[in-house]
Amino acid sequence: MFTSMADSLRIRFDGNRHREDAIEQAARFYDCNKSDAAAQACEDVVEIVRAAEEVLQREDLTLEQRQEIAATFSTRVSEFDVQLEIGRE
């Protein structure tokens, strides 16, 4: 599955408890050390955001469905927004 991406990664918390908690949560989620967890989370987030954007662009979904999906995918850090654009050429 995943192999170690880095021999060593130093993460500075600088008293930021949220940052430390997030890294520890990722390590528990991925069941690995903090360095590997940070690397895996960074890789995953790019793919997850791409997938979410792809889903939100599906034409078979209603505006309401897209807004519900956007709200579900939105986090403290990333927010997805769907708007209906009406225009005339």
Image: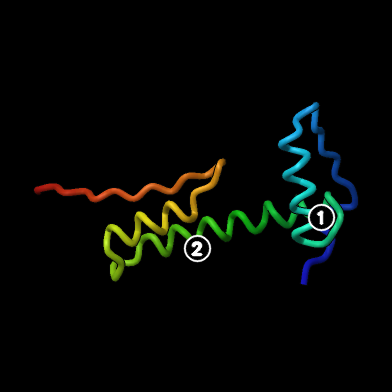
- Residue 55: x and y in percent read 42, 64
- Residue 42: x and y in percent read 68, 51
Q: Residues within 10 Å of mark 2 (few under 14, many from 20)?
A: few
Q: Nearer the viewer, residue 6 or 35?
A: 35
What label sits on residue 51 in the rendered view? 2
Name the residue: 27% across, 58% down: 63
Res 11 → quadrant: top right
Name the residue: 86% across, 54% down: 33
Secondary structure beneath label 1: helix
* 45 relative to 78 in the view: left or right: right
* Amino acid type, mark 1: Asp
Residue reaching furthest top?
A: 15
* 25 relative to 68 in the view: left or right: right
Q: Residues within 10 Å of mark 1 (few under 14, many from 20)?
A: many
Mark closer to the chain start, 2 or 1: 1
- Residue 81: x and y in percent read 38, 47
Residue reaching furthest right?
A: 7
* 83 relative to 9 in the view: left or right: left
What label sits on residue 20 in the rendered view? none
Name the residue: 58% across, 60% down: 47
Looking at the rendering, in which quadrant would you find the N terminus?
Answer: bottom right
Q: How is the image coloured?
A: rainbow
Residue 75 higher or lower than 64, as above or below:
above
Residue 29 higher or lower than 78, as above or below:
below
- Residue 77: x and y in percent read 56, 41
Name the residue: 76% across, 46% down: 23
Residue reaching furthest left?
A: 88
Question: How far is the residue under mark 2 from the one under mark 1?
Answer: 23 Å
Q: How many marks?
A: 2
Instruction: Read off the residue under disc 1.
Output: 36
* 7 relative to 38 in the view: left or right: right
